[in-house]
Amino acid sequence: DAHVGNELTQVLYTPEDLSARLKEVSAEIDQEYKDKDLLLVGVLSGAVMVMADLSRALTIHCEMDWMAISSYGSGTQSSGVVRILKDLNTDIADRHVLIVEDIIDTGLTLSYLVSNLRSRGPASLEIMTMFRKPEAAKSDVDVRWVGFDIPNEFVVGYGLDYDGRYRNLTSVGTLSPHIYS
Ligand code: PRP
Ligand code: MN
Ligand code: MG
């Protein structure tokens, strides 16, 4: 990987690690929703990679919809200010909704999203996130499926960006401090 040693100090997860874990998680989701009509809600833009891979790892039918909400702007710290940039196209009343996220950092984004979506009366509402930083939590979010718990370091790749870049890295790694300091 050309980014390692320059922009990434360390690779935490290879594409093989990511797909192996998604295979395990998708088997549980298959089981949970086998008799239900599943709507996956991806949070743009970070969740595009996990949505693409998780949805294709499932063997059950599902629909997909997207919300764009942003709290970060261009910094590396969450502002806690959440804005809806694009709402769902789907009415989720009485639907089984699974939110798909790339990462839970402070939890502020998902706390907001969960209360917002819950007010629309879904039949069920669960969360799947590829990554979670337990040490960074500022808000308690009830997460049903977590790919990996990771240390409180700034990571990029597989949808995770710094200032809009690095989302398309196939591995996930820690960003060299010289990039953002
Ligand atoms: C990132 C990430 C999560 C959120 C997590 O999104 O994709 O959605 O932050 O942070 P939190 O738990 O501290 O709220 P971001 O707002 O950077 O937008 P993006 O997905 O377009 O990168
Ligand atoms: Mn995001
Ligand atoms: Mg971001």
Image (cartoon, rainbow, N blue to C red):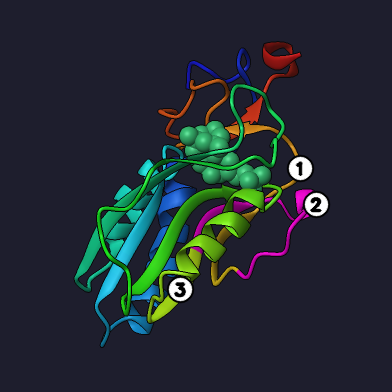
Q: Residue at point 22% right, 74% down?
A: 60
Residue 66 in picture, x, y percent from top left: 33, 49
Indicate the amino acid at tag 3.
Answer: Leu
Residue 174 in picture, x, y percent from top left: 66, 30
Mark 3 neighbour class, 10 Å CA radius: few under 14, some 14 to 19, many 20 or more = some
Q: How far apart are marks 3 and 1 (CA)?
A: 27 Å
Of tags 3 and 1, the one toward the viewer is: 3
Q: Would you say the residues marked 2 and 1 are in contact, meaning their CB atoms lie under 8 Å apart?
A: yes
Magenta-span inclusion, residue 141:
yes
Magenta extent: 128-142
Of tags 2 and 3, the one toward the viewer is: 3
**Within the image, what quadrant is residue 142 found in?**
bottom right
Q: Which quarter of the image is occupied by the C terminus?
A: top right
Q: Residue furthest front?
A: 119
* Pointer 2 residue: 135
Question: What is the secondary structure assignment of the residue under circle 1?
Answer: loop
**Within the image, what quadrant is residue 153 found in?**
top right
> Of callouts 3 and 1, which one flags the residue occurring earlier in the amino acid sequence?
3
Indicate the amino acid at tag 1.
Answer: Asn
* Pointer 3 residue: 125
Mark 2 neighbour class, 10 Å CA radius: few under 14, some 14 to 19, many 20 or more = few
Would residue 10 be visible to someone looking at this image? no
Magenta-span inclusion, residue 154:
no
Residue 155 in picture, x, y percent from top left: 63, 34
Q: Distance between the residues labelled 2 and 1?
A: 6 Å
> Of callouts 2 and 3, which one flags the residue occurring earlier in the amino acid sequence?
3
Mark 1 neighbour class, 10 Å CA radius: few under 14, some 14 to 19, many 20 or more = few
Question: What is the secondary structure assignment of the residue under circle 2?
Answer: helix
* Pointer 1 residue: 152
